[in-house]
Image (cartoon, rainbow, N blue to C red):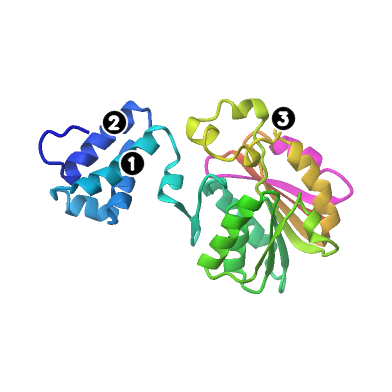
Amino acid sequence: MSDEGPWTIRRVLRWTTGFFQEKGIESARLDAELLIAHALGISRIQVYTDHDRPLHPDELTAIRDRVRRRARHEPIAYILGQRGFRDLDLKVDPRVLIPRPETELLVDVALTKLTGVEAPLVVDVGTGSGAIALSIAQARPDAQVIAIDVSPDALAVARENGAANGLGNVEFLQGDLLTPLGERRAHLVASNPPYIATEACRHLMPDVRDFEPRLALDGGRDGLQVIRRLIPAAAAALRPGGALVIEIGHDQGDALRRLLDGPDWTGAHVHADLAGHDRVAEATRA
């Protein structure tokens, strides 16, 4: 930033927006607003109502730090340290995948499958930030929810989010897929597994490729490596009539229909997201 003239909020916003545009950041204006508000401890509305206020040197330093990070394409959710998901405010950092709006569809489908089921046992496989498990626990206080992740770092974030949102009906377990469930049988298994093909991971936008955990993204050669293991594991872990709900890639619907076409499953169906892409596969344990 130049030192010529006073740096008001409006001037910093204009400069930051232009700088982000030069760096190829699509949501340049929005990101500038969010980072300035975060650095100053004010709301986005105040960025405009107080736009003529000159900034102190320490405030400019705080803004510069956040602008530099975003200019390197660090996800804004990591810089802000939080992400909204349904009715939750979730802590996020590079230990966990940033929850996406598409995953809210998975939660919607999961809750529909629990209609009429009293005190269900629900398992979220690969919980990450806890977005799925905690959303279900919030919507169904009678449920016993188990959040599983192979990463202890991810589980630490999920536990923090559970405590911060006052959700005590969630158990956090470390392990591979459904192994930590033991002999318990669930009414619902939900998962947002890694489903991006290894080669495709190399071509993701830098915000994702260079910052989000590869473990939560890379689904092997064709993106289905984890899903192929998850489906039989879920068949063994579900009660008869229980449901499996999985988030999938936009081009994986046909593959999931084939994988769920067997004696263990009935009623396989793929739901499209708001963009019309395959996004959530479900099936019922026969």
Q: Secondary structure at mark 3?
A: loop
Q: Nearer the viewer, residue 141 or 280?
A: 141
- Furthest toward the right, the residue is 263
Give the image quarter of residue 76. Answer: top left
In space, the residues marked 3 and 1 are separated at their CA atoms by 39 Å
Considering only order in the chain, which callout, 1 or 3, is on the residue closer to the N terminus?
1
Residue 255's x, y, as percent? Answer: 75, 35
> What type is the residue that disc 2 sits on?
Phe
Question: Which residue is denoted by mark 3 in the rendering?
Answer: 222
Residue 275's x, y, as percent? Answer: 53, 40
Q: Which mark is residue 65?
A: 1
**In the figure, is residue 58 to the left or right of 218?**
left
Label 3 with label 1: CB-CB less than 8 Å: no
Q: Secondary structure at mark 1?
A: helix
Give the image quarter of residue 236. Answer: bottom right
> What type is the residue that disc 3 sits on?
Asp
Q: Which residues are magenta?
A: 253-275
Residue 80's x, y, as percent? Answer: 40, 49
**In the figure, is residue 33 to the left or right of 175?**
left
Label 3 with label 2: CB-CB less than 8 Å: no
> What type is the residue that disc 1 sits on?
Asp
Which residue is pictured at 45% across the width and 47% down the height?
A: 77
Q: Which mark is residue 19?
A: 2
| Residue 257 is a magenta residue | yes
Badge 2, how many Cα within 10 Å: few under 14, some, many 20+?
some
Vertical placement of residue 141 versus 83, above or below: below
